[in-house]
Amino acid sequence: MSPTTVAPARHIGDEERRIRLARAHLLSPAARAGTPLEVARSMVALHGTDPATVYLAVGARLADPAGTVAGVEAALYEERSLVRMHGMRHTVFVFPSELAATVHASTGLAVAAKARAGLLKDMVSGSDGRLTPEWLAEVEASALAALERRGQATVAELTVDEPRLKESFVYGRGRSYEAPHTVPSRLMRVLGVEGRVVRGRPLGSWTSTQFRWAVAPPHPERPVAEAQSELLRRWLAVCGPATEADLKWWTGWKVTEVRRALAAVGAVVVSLDGGGTGYVLADGLGAPEGEPGPWAALLPGLDPTAMGWQERDWYCPPELRSALFDRSGNIGPTVWWNGRVVGGWGQREGGEVVWRLLDGSGGRRAARSVAAEADRLTAWLAGVRVTPRFRTPLERELAG
């Protein structure tokens, strides 16, 4: 399927895309969800690179955010209805558990093969052949057996059971980025991408970046093409219309894989503002019924809405990006008004949420709505201060 050979079924402009976003992403007050699992299912995936993002992204989409932390922790560690695992683009996400097999087959297998090959190459060359593939296989089996016995464990605890995990090797020898790498720091990431281990409870609070590990629960193997079609269908239902470039970026797949999955789900071509083309599911071709009404939202850094598309001009004006993105392209905490990014927010030392509008097009009404959302967020954080893992110029300035 190619947009150059298929006539668009209809036009979907930027304003309609923003209306769709308000409902599908649970951001307008009337669209908010009741539980963390509902949020995860609606969004397909919650960015988990920064652990706090998961909680903040859920809280922004709940009708009552007061129980966000307890609810997310229960879903992750007690009910197991959510799972934190590697997914698209070798990134950590939180998914509904029923999607684990789909994510693993659609994206994890290819990434895992490259990750393991890279580990073996770096480990052997960085140890002058002292650490071999056979050695790693033996240590890996021993570590997994220890993890099974313990249920959950830190790397330090596993090292007690398997002392050979203390070994290290030199990465990038002779290069400007030369650095020592420990075996477990690389091995656990590979095992995570392979779907053999998952992150368990954090060592500290819900904002901690240090996790225990656990053996991943078994899940059925799925054909790759079938899993890719299923993942793309779910994502397009939430984020359509999306361009081919958006789909390739979000999934991390090859163009041929994206096109095959688009054909498999019967995606429909539409025209977009600016002369581009995008895709929607056939049952998503109709126009939204009514507008969601004025709404404001304070979303965290790496929020799945803010990071949902590669082409972002329709919701994030280019002139705002120098203040809201870091140098690697990670978006920080953002303020939204009616489907557009209009500013950013941060927290002062005492935990108060502070914000700034960089686009005043919403006038006083937008400012009042944003202030109400800031008070809402301050209340449920209850003094907990969250520092984004990837800090941006405006967030740093507001935090003081």
Image (spheres, rainbow, N blue to C red):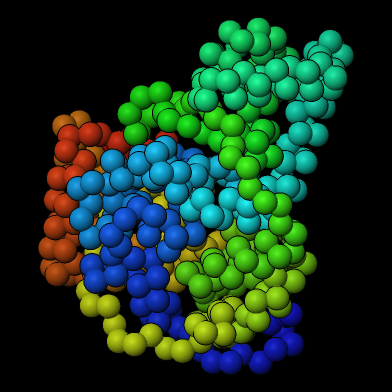
Instruction: State how many labels appear.
Output: 0
Pinpoint residue 128: horizontal percent, then vertical percent.
85, 12
In the image: residue 299, left or right of residue 178: left
Q: Could you tell me which quadrant the C terminus lies in?
A: top left
The structure residue drawn at horizontal position 35% and vertical position 72%, both measured from the top left corner, is 23
Q: Could you tell me which quadrant the N terminus lies in?
A: bottom right
In the image: residue 350, left or right of residue 358: left
**Which residue occupies the extreme front position in the image?**
149
Q: Is residue 180 visible?
A: no
Pinpoint residue 256: horizontal percent, then vertical percent.
77, 67
The structure residue drawn at horizontal position 45% and vertical position 26%, both measured from the top left corner, is 210
The structure residue drawn at horizontal position 63% and vertical position 80%, both measured from the top left corner, is 267
Q: Which one is in front, 179 or 110? A: 110
The quadrant in which residue 180 appears is top right
Q: Is residue 7 visible?
A: yes
Pinpoint residue 211: horizontal percent, then vertical percent.
47, 27
The structure residue drawn at horizontal position 77% and vertical position 40%, both measured from the top left corner, is 114
Q: Is residue 73 above or below residue 184?
A: below
Q: Which one is in front, 263 or 141? A: 141
Pinpoint residue 122: horizontal percent, then vertical percent.
78, 24
Q: Which one is in front, 341 or 74? A: 74
In the image: residue 25, left or right of residue 29: right
Q: Is residue 57 above or below residue 157?
A: below
Q: Is residue 170 above or below residue 395?
A: above
